[in-house]
Amino acid sequence: MGFTNKKRKVAVRRNAPRKAVKGKYSVKTFELLPLPRPSIELRGIEIKPTDLHKFLGLYFDQALKFLEHAAHALEKGTKWVEQFRRVAKPSTGIAGKHMRCFYISAVIPKILYGASIFLIPPSSGMRGSKTIITKLGRIQRIAGLYITAAMRSTANEIVDAHADLLPFSLLVDKLCHAEAIRIATLPATHPLHAHAQATA
């Protein structure tokens, strides 16, 4: 049940923000209070606030949870794999080795674009992306079944081994490590070099 405008005004009048800092609840919980976000006007153009913004192909929400981007990646991957199914028929379709190349060169870059930003590698030991990685891994399983023409009851590990694909969690690790290495080896003239060295 959300706050109404009247309750919000009463809370602000009673110094709720200051009491939240002094109280037993942390300041982070105050962000749960839905404060109004007015629109901005720049050069006669009104810019309305939104909960979601697409920037450089990634969907950013105000809490930086990336759940919308993960849902978008899942939707995009499902769409690609459905197209994949039409081409990969065992009797009349393209051979499995060509479908594997297609999956690696077209589908993986589509679903894992910006993976180092919205996914936490499983090897880091931190929580947060396990559910998303599991859901995206299902797309790889379906693609692996089409590549190998295996039965649906085949285990994931066997499908990945026969399709010559990395397990999805290791694939995410590989991509995140490759991006970390690329950032760490930037030349000194690059604008991000100082930031990369400061965080190392």
Image (spheres, grey):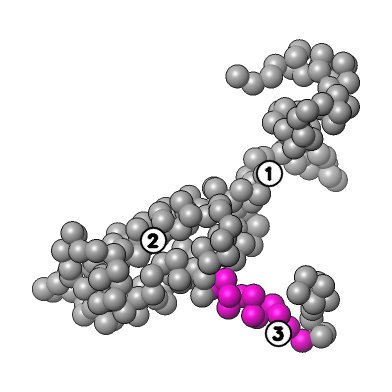
Query: Residue 188 or 126: which is nearer the viewer?
Result: 126
Labelled pair 2, 3 in contact (Cβ < 8 Å) = no
| Rendered image quadrant of residue 36 | top right
Q: Determine if residue 86 is in view.
A: no
Residue 14 percent across, percent down from the top left: 87, 16
Query: Residue 48 or 14: which is nearer the viewer?
Result: 14
Q: Secondary structure at mark 3?
A: loop
User: Label 2, label 3: how many angstroms apart (C-alpha)?
Assistant: 30 Å
Identity, as a three-letter code, of the amino acid under mark 2: Gly
Residue 106 percent across, percent down from the top left: 41, 72
Query: What is the number of the mark on residue 185?
Result: 3
Task: Residue 66: say if magenta.
Answer: no
Labelled pair 1, 2 in contact (Cβ < 8 Å) = no
Identity, as a three-letter code, of the amino acid under mark 1: Gln
Q: Determine if residue 190 is in view.
A: yes
Mark positioned earlier in the residue sequence (1 or 3): 1
Query: What is the number of the mark on residue 137?
Result: 2
- Look at discs 1 and 2 and give the one toward the viewer: 2
Q: Secondary structure at mark 1?
A: loop
Residue 4 percent across, percent down from the top left: 70, 16
User: Label 1, label 2: how many angstroms apart (C-alpha)?
Assistant: 27 Å
Residue occupied by mark 1: 62
User: Label 1, label 3: how many angstroms apart (C-alpha)?
Assistant: 31 Å
Image quadrant containing the N terminus: top right
| Rendered image quadrant of residue 21 | top right
Q: Which residues are magenta?
A: 175-187
Identity, as a three-letter code, of the amino acid under mark 3: Thr
